[in-house]
């Protein structure tokens, strides 16, 4: 599988593999420099140091070094691409500082110019300590482990003087097969540019156009276009060439919009069925291998899912690429979890939220699978302080990409003050489980009345009665291999019954447009600072698979329900709507 965007003519230095590594521990950042680097050992890239016996549990700075090819020319432009790292990173090329990364999980890049002949080296120091100034986007209370290292691929692109950054493709009309291309150049950008465009490896069309802000926009028809949908995940490629560079991008012809209480995919109402998915594995942490990503998509398909909510940070583009190929719709969100009102109103936090959210949209723009851009899971969106940031993020997303839907997962119900801003109302709720335990009522009996009551509050006179309603989280825990005759809490039996009851209650309610159950597989939660008393094994055990993707009873039970709902696909008669 080709990874997109693909730059067929560029010289790219692949930096994956082993790097020299040294542990600086609890060092002060003021004293951290690439000078005098003494390698202690080696470290895998991509990979995190927390999953290794020597550094597991430790928080501090690890410093990495890689020797680079000697043939870079003085004056040559290079672009260091890091597809995701955390928590905080600082990079130096030949001893000179080239950038800091405060955006865990985001795909970022740093440009530099070679100053002198080789030898050349790259040094990157990565800190996995929590720090309000350096890593304000990641708090110690988040219910997923904060790892240190390179989560994803690293590469160095040797850039021509004038380079193509990206080509963003927006499907305009899926019947006529028209698309808008936004071609972004950088470097030594001319006033007018000659370029060619070809679709699916076919004949190239030649153009010459003026640039505006380094960009060219044009509308074209895709020859022999095919419509993308979960049942027919048909993809196209487009290759754009300028004299000094070329890029190949992949896209799909599909539209998404809302109409009243429905989400319409290619003009037809769609019921969304799926799970919440973290990037997590006991031995890999957040660094997912291609085989593991494929396994995850196959599990989703085998359970009759057509949707996945990628929580709680921008996920690996290769996973989104697999969803494009295999027909799984995607919700993707920027990093955040339960953030408090004071944070939401903090300027530094706001700026970083906007930066990472814009980057998420730019990076993921061409994936037809992505239908919803989201942010700030379960923050204090019931407070006045939340309004400016929620406004900023929704505007930023629509400014980058007006062609998709915007949402965020809220646990504030009717107290939420920000629902006006978004296209889809998304609710997280755990009847009979998190924060809603009534010792008299078995939790599975609490589910249906709770959902009905919650749904009612978004009907009739509600200001949001005419927006789609999605249950973005509902579910419960079950410990893999734990059984008893009573079906007590934490058993696989209890979990299976709860999950099916919840999914059924949501999907059979005509007011809702779908559900993502919490959660797909078990994930590592807090370290020793956290409230392990409520998280047995230090894990979030709500997966229908365990952390090694071994199925629990809930997998088959939910799979049966979701699969049965695949046909007939839901268009519900409009008279059913409330
Ligand atoms: C919240 C949160 C999830 C998870 C869940 C739980 O709803 O959004 O990330 O932490 O609670 O299992 O506690």
Image (cartoon, rainbow, N blue to C red):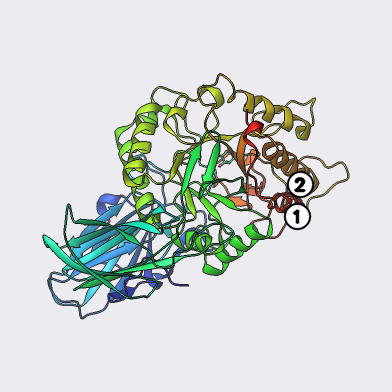
Q: Position of residue 144 (x, y in %)?
A: 53, 47
* Extreme residue in the right direction: 485
* Extreme residue in the top direction: 461
- Location of ligand 1 given as a quarter of the image: top right
The residue tagged with tag 2: helix, strand or loop? helix
Q: Position of residue 222 (x, y in %)?
A: 38, 64
Residue at 58 percent of width and 51 percent of height: 307
Q: Earlier in the sequence, mark 1 or mark 2?
A: 2
Q: Are marks 1 and 2 in contact (CB under 8 Å)?
A: yes
Q: Is mark 1 within 8 Å of ligand 1?
A: no
Q: Is mark 2 within 8 Å of ligand 1?
A: no
Task: Specify whether residue 287 is in view.
Answer: no
Residue bearing the label numbered 2: 496
Q: Which mark is residue 556?
A: 1
Direction from residue 245 to residue 356 in the image, left or right: right
* Extreme residue in the front direction: 176
> Which quadrant of the rendered structure holds the C terminus?
top right
Residue at 53 percent of width and 41 percent of height: 263
- Disc 1 crowd rating (10 Å Cα; few below 14, some 14-19, many 20+) is some
Q: Position of residue 361 (x, y in %)?
A: 37, 50
Q: Which mark is residue 244?
A: none
Q: Identify which residue, 294 or 335, lies in the foreground.
A: 294
């Amino acid at each position: 599988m080709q990874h997109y965007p693909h730059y067929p003519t560029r010289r790219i230095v692949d930096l994956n593999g082993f790097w020299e590594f040294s542990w600086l521990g609890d060092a002060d950042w003021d004293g951290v420099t690439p000078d005098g680097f003494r390698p202690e050992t080696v470290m895998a890239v991509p990979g995190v140091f927390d999953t290794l016996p020597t550094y597991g549990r430790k928080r501090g700075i690890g410093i990495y070094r890689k020797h680079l090819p000697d043939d870079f020319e003085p004056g040559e432009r290079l672009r260091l691409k890091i597809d995701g790292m955390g928590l905080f990173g600082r990079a130096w090329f030949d001893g000179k500082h080239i950038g800091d990364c405060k955006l865990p999980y985001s795909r970022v890049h740093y440009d530099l110019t070679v100053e002198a002949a080789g030898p050349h080296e790259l040094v990157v120091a990565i800190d996995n300590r929590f720090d309000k100034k350096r890593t304000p986007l990641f708090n110690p209370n988040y219910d997923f482990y904060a790892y240190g290292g390179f989560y994803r691929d690293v590469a160095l692109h040797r850039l021509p003087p004038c380079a193509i950054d990206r080509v963003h493709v927006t499907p305009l009309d899926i019947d006529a097969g028209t698309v808008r291309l936004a071609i972004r150049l950088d470097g030594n950008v001319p006033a007018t540019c000659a370029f060619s465009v070809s679709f699916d490896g076919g004949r190239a069309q030649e153009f010459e156009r003026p640039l505006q802000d380094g960009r060219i926009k044009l509308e074209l028809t895709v020859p022999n276009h095919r419509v993308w949908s979960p049942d027919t995940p048909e993809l196209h490629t487009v290759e754009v060439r300028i004299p000094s560079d070329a890029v190949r991008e992949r896209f799909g012809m599909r539209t998404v919009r809302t109409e009243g209480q429905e989400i319409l995919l290619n003009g037809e109402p769609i019921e969304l069925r799926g799970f919440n998915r973290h990037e997590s594995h006991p031995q890999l942490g957040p660094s997912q291998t291609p085989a593991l990503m494929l396994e995850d998509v196959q599990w989703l398909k085998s359970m009759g899912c057509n949707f996945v909510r990628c929580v709680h940070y921008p996920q690996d583009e290769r996973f989104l690429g697999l969803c494009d190929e295999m027909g799984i719709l995607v919700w993707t969100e920027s990093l955040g979890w339960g953030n408090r009102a004071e944070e939401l109103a903090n300027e530094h936090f706001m700026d970083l939220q906007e930066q990472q959210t814009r980057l998420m949209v730019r990076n993921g723009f061409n994936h037809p699978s992505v239908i919803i851009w989201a942010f700030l899971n379960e923050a204090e969106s019931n407070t006045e302080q939340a309004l400016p940031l929620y406004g900023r993020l929704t505007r930023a997303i629509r400014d980058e990409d007006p062609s998709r839907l915007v949402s965020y997962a809220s646990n504030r119900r009717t107290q939420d003050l920000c629902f006006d801003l978004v296209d889809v109302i998304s609710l997280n709720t755990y009847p009979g489980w998190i924060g809603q335990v009534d010792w008299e009522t078995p939790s599975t009996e609490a589910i249906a009345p709770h959902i009905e009551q919650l749904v009612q509050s978004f009907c009739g006179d509600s200001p949001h009665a005419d927006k789609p309603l999605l249950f973005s989280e509902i579910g419960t825990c079950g410990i893999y291999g734990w059984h008893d005759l009573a079906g007590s809490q934490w058993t696989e039996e209890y979990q299976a019954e709860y999950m099916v009851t919840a999914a059924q209650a949501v999907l059979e309610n005509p007011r809702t447009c779908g559900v993502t159950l919490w959660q797909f597989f078990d994930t590592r939660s807090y370290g020793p600072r956290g409230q392990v008393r409520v998280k047995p094994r230090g894990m979030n055990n709500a997966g229908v698979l365990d952390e090694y993707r071994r199925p629990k009873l809930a997998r088959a039970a939910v799979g049966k329900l979701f699969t049965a709902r695949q046909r007939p696909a839901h268009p519900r008669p409009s008279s059913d709507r409330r």
